[in-house]
Amino acid sequence: MASSAAQRELFAEGVRAVLHTWPVLQIAVDNGFGGAYGQQKADWLVGVVQQYFHDNADLQQCEVEDFIAELMDQEFDTVVDDGSLPQVSSSLLQMFTQWQQGALSQLKHTIDSLTPKKSQRAKVTAPPTASDDENEDETQVMECETSSPSVSRTQQAPPPPSPEEEDGWTVVRKRK
């Protein structure tokens, strides 16, 4: 079995390539599912997964899937149900097998095939909704009112109260 530091680092690089190109982990980090230190957790995850493989020489795919799913749930509050977990686990098992057998050039080639994909990060953005547009308009009006000092101190009559809007909600307005 391969055991030198350089060979062990090559397997760590493989784990890093698989996990950091995994869209589920990218989305979790980019959107703050892991909190303020999401990127550090993603880097930590690489070390933990690598150590898991070294501590358990004869792993089955379902064991790797369960381990990674548990880590994603605990650290990123993310349940992986997009079907990508078996692919990630299979890739990791393949790399570990290559590393164990000493097929380091093949392992390096596998890592290189994943690395160009790293620049193609998945990005999730929510489209603006009608209620978001209304909130932005209200915010802009509020900012204008608070930022400009009032010269006139005359009291304006409050608008006539509307008991209920169309959707059944009662609108409460602040008096000036």
Image (tube, rainbow, N blue to C red):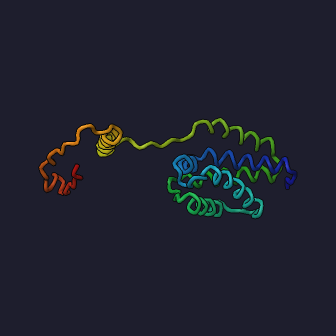
* In-image side of 108 versus 38 (left or right): right
The image position of residue 44, as x and y in percent, is 68, 55
In the picture as drawn, the residue positioned furthest to the right comes out as: 4
- Assign the N terminus to one quadrant of the image: bottom right
Residue at coordinates 41% horizontally, 44% vertically from top-left?
126
In the picture as drawn, the residue positioned furthest to the left comes out as: 160
Decide if residue 83 is in sight here. Answer: yes
Residue at coordinates 45% horizontally, 42% vertically from top-left?
125
The image position of residue 158, as x and y in percent, is 16, 48
Between 34 and 143, the one lying in front of the other is 143
Between 175 and 90, the one lying in front of the other is 175
* In-image side of 148 versus 8 (left or right): left
Between 166 and 98, the one lying in front of the other is 166
User: Total marks drawn?
Assistant: 0
Relative to 125, is 53 above or below?
Answer: below
Relative to 45, is 105 above or below?
Answer: above
Decide if residue 133 is in sight here. Answer: no
Residue at coordinates 32% horizontally, 38% vertically from top-left?
149
* In-image side of 84 versus 4 (left or right): left
Residue at coordinates 69% horizontally, 57% vertically from top-left?
49
The image position of residue 81, as x and y in percent, is 50, 56
The image position of residue 132, as x and y in percent, is 33, 44
